Amino acid sequence: MGSTPTRERILDAALDLFGARGVDAVSLDDIASVVGVRKQSLLYWFASKAELVNAVLDRAAFELVAVMDAAIRASGPDPLDRIDSIVCAVFRPVVRRPTLLGLIREVGRLDPHHVRHLAERLAPHITDARSYLEQQMACGSLRMGDPGLIAAMVYATVTGIGTDRQLLDTVGWVPDAAGLRQLRDQLRAFLRAALAP
């Protein structure tokens, strides 16, 4: 426990539990037990489970956007290299914390209120990404296509293939750090081939 503030410990525990077991299967009592506090202490920080779910989604989105922004700043001017850097950046936290993939999987199962909440947080970043892809396609640096659909396909690949246990078992993919790196590298190669002019 140590010096980590209680609110942060609650968010960490909730993210891991939601990602591992699903939002509906986790109670506030479960989270309080993992954190080592009473349920009332948890309710001091988050008035309801819905509020806690939104806070966990905010935190996950903030962390992913931060690593993507850093990747963009560190990458060169080549759009294929930039896209490659972003894919690598997104997979880094997932390799360190596989329950993030589980949380991503949960987004499609959440109450529409939570989905809207997350969509509002991500909307400006999605708009920026789409504009960037459109500009690069217009100047011939990337193959022409629908930037929104391309972004959606990347998202679907990460969330679908990255979280569909039955499909993964069928192809013999192992959802460990090495397997996640393999998935990342296949996605990188696929995007480079698909978007090269």
Image: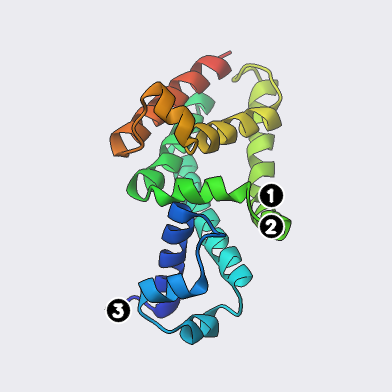
Q: Is residue 112 left or right of residue 99?
A: right
- In this view, the residue in front, 149 or 45, is 45
Q: Which mark is residue 20?
A: none
User: According to the image, label 2 marks what residue?
Assistant: 111
Residue 97, percent across and down?
37, 51
The residue lying at 36 percent from left, 24 percent from top is: 172
Q: Is residue 122 visible?
A: yes
Query: Which quadrant: the N terminus?
Result: bottom left
The residue lying at 47 percent from left, 85 percent from top is: 41
Q: Earlier in the sequence, mark 1 or mark 3?
A: 3
- In this view, the residue in front, 102 or 165, is 165
Secondary structure beneath disc 3? loop
Q: Is residue 117 left or right of residue 64?
A: right
Q: Earlier in the sequence, mark 2 or mark 3?
A: 3
Query: Which quadrant: the C terminus?
Result: top right
Looking at the image, the residue that sits furthest to the left is 2
Q: Residues within 10 Å of mark 3 (few under 14, many from 20)?
A: few
Residue 190, percent across and down?
49, 19
User: According to the image, label 1 marks what residue?
Assistant: 123
Comparing labels 2 and 1, the label whose residue is closer to the camera: 2
The answer to whether marks 2 and 3 mark residues whose Cβ atoms lie closer than 8 Å is no
In 3D space, how far apart are the residues under numbered discs 1 and 3 (Cα atoms)? 34 Å
Q: Amino acid at mark 2?
A: Asp
The residue lying at 53 percent from left, 85 percent from top is: 44
User: According to the image, label 3 marks what residue?
Assistant: 3
In 3D space, how far apart are the residues under numbered discs 2 and 1 (Cα atoms)? 18 Å
In 3D space, how far apart are the residues under numbered discs 2 and 3 (Cα atoms)? 34 Å
